[in-house]
């Protein structure tokens, strides 16, 4: 059956739609942090559907909310009033921390970032964008234009003029030997220089992930983007915080990734964990920015009643069960297992991340040459040991470890030991 499904997939789906594993697996059910494949084998899910099933699989409150909404109404659109959509928007507006915030819902993070770019470029009357090296913002036409990662940038054709500045990926940075304060200062000076050298001056925005997701969970020093904000403010440049992967408490320390940097963004995008797997995303912006468009617009599926029901239930679960605090505590337990590996294993260059968002960069022993093949072998070995993890990074050589925020200490110990063993064996 699995071979047949794989053949059908390859025959029907685009070849650029990647699949994990030499023998791809089909997941058919899940509960908490456990998933089951079509052969009946169970795994600890340490990737959460690319950081999406944030509260775990089969959470009763979320499942019930979706079922109850499905019994009433599956779909309307933004052309009609929706109390549940407005209630969710009101909650997110307050949680965002953005003064006078307004919210627009979309079905995916790519479309949320696309909407944020539309707003920023329209508000500033400029097509010039600052983005971060090693970034990823989605698969839409505009999102790939601002993605600073060759593996995820299929075309250079866009209507945007993009300049890439230094960010949080320090391991391969020319400033990597500097301390946090000096590193930040060097990157801020680089930002000033690039605005003066590589742009026409009237830049629309800087868009940044507080912690880079697909880029391998690269983490800048705390306060990094806060140090950049005065440079942007001097020139009227907007700051967009892409919270698609860092939002909803995953970093443990904060509800939003931007809160580690001592600033408030002008716009914020969200997706993934907000509805625990249902297609819900959106952009939050100051009122004058959100209202700047001079033409009508709607979203057929943004704020869909089913997704909104899941979103409201998910946020409630995250907050009432203390999942942000659990992410902080369980993340510390994982780091206690992983951090010594950078000194003990010659092919582990770095362990980094915050909360339940941890990257392990794999290299050829004796240097920093990326070893994507070894990272792939570790991915396979983790699966053999019953744990599903992700893989990313600029060179495809970083393990991405991001389980649901509801994971237990016992599951952390069991899954973490399996990952350590896979790294030791590969």
Image (cartoon, helix red, strand yellow):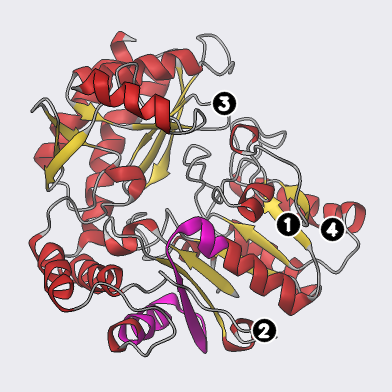
Q: Image quarter for residue 399?
A: top left
Q: Position of residue 143 (x, y in %)?
A: 61, 53
Q: Nearer the viewer, residue 17 or 31?
A: 17
Q: Position of residue 288 (x, y in %)?
A: 63, 88
Mark closer to the chain start, 1 or 3: 1
In the rendered view, would you say 145 is above or below 113?
Answer: above
Number of residues whose C-alpha sits closer than 10 Å to that of mark 2, classed few (under 14), some (14–19) or many (20 or more) = few
Mark closer to the chain start, 3 or 4: 4
Q: Image quarter for residue 205?
A: bottom right
- Label 1 sits on residue: 130
Q: Nearer the viewer, mark 2 or mark 3?
A: 2
- On residue 395, which mark appears? 3
- Measure how far apart labels 1 and 3 are at the Cα level: 22 Å
Residue 83 seen = yes
Mark closer to the chain start, 2 or 1: 1
Point out the stretch of residues depicted in magenta.
86-113
Q: Nearer the viewer, residue 275 or 245?
A: 275
Task: Identify the residue at image location x=37%, y=64%.
Answer: 280
- The secondary structure type at the circle numbered 3 is loop
- Label 2 sits on residue: 295
Quadrant including the N terminus: top left
- The secondary structure type at the circle numbered 1 is strand
Q: Position of residue 115 (x, y in %)?
A: 58, 68
Task: Identify the residue at image location x=17%, y=25%.
Answer: 386
Mark closer to the chain start, 1 or 4: 1
Q: Nearer the viewer, mark 1 or mark 4?
A: 1
Is residue 180 toward the left or the right of residue 213 in the image?
Answer: right
Residues tagged 2 and 1 counted as in contact (Cβ below 8 A) = no
- Measure how far apart labels 2 and 3 are at the Cα level: 41 Å
Q: Nearer the viewer, mark 3 or mark 4?
A: 3
């Amino acid at each position: 059956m699995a071979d047949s499904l794989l053949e059908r997939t390859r025959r029907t789906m685009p070849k650029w739609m990647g699949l994990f594993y030499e023998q791809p697996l089909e997941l058919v059910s899940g509960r908490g942090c456990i998933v089951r494949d079509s052969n009946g084998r169970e795994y600890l899910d340490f990737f959460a559907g690319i950081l999406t099933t944030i509260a775990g699989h089969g959470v009763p409150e979320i499942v019930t909310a979706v079922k109850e909404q499905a019994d009433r109404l599956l779909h309307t659109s933004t052309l009609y009033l929706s109390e549940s959509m407005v209630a969710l928007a009101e909650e997110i507006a307050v949680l965002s921390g953005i003064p006078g915030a307004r919210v627009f819902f979309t079905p995916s993070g790519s479309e949320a970032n696309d909407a944020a770019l539309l707003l920023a470029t329209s508000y500033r009357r400029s097509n010039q964008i600052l983005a971060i090296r090693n970034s990823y913002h989605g698969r839409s036409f505009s999102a790939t234009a601002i993605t600073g990662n060759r593996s995820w940038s299929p075309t250079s054709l866009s209507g945007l003029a993009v300049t890439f500045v230094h960010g949080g990926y320090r391991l391969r940075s020319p400033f990597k030997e500097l301390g946090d304060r000096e590193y930040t200062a060097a990157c801020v000076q680089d930002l000033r220089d690039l605005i003066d050298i590589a742009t026409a001056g009237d830049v629309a925005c800087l868009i940044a992930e507080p912690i880079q997701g697909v880029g391998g969970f690269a983490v800048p020093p705390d306060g990094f983007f806060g140090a950049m904000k005065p440079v942007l403010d001097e020139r009227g440049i907007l700051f967009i915080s892409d919270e698609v992967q860092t939002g909803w408490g995953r970093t443990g320390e904060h509800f939003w990734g931007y809160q580690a940097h001592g600033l408030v963004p002008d716009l914020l995008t969200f997706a993934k964990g907000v509805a625990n797997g249902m297609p819900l995303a959106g952009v939050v912006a100051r009122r004058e920015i959100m209202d700047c468009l001079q033409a009508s617009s709607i979203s057929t599926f943004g704020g869909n009643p089913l997704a909104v029901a899941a979103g409201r239930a998910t946020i409630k679960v995250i907050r009432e069960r203390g999942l942000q605090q659990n992410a902080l505590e369980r993340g510390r337990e994982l780091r206690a297992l992983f951090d010594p590996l950078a000194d003990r294993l010659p092919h582990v260059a770095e362990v980094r991340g915050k909360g339940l968002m941890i990257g392990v960069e794999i290299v050829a022993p004796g240097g920093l040459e990326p070893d994507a093949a070894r990272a792939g072998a570790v991915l396979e070995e983790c699966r053999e040991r019953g744990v599903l993890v992700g893989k990313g990074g600029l060179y495809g050589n970083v393990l991405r470890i991001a389980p649901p925020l509801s994971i237990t200490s016992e599951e952390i110990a069991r899954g973490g030991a399996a990952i350590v063993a896979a790294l030791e064996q590969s």
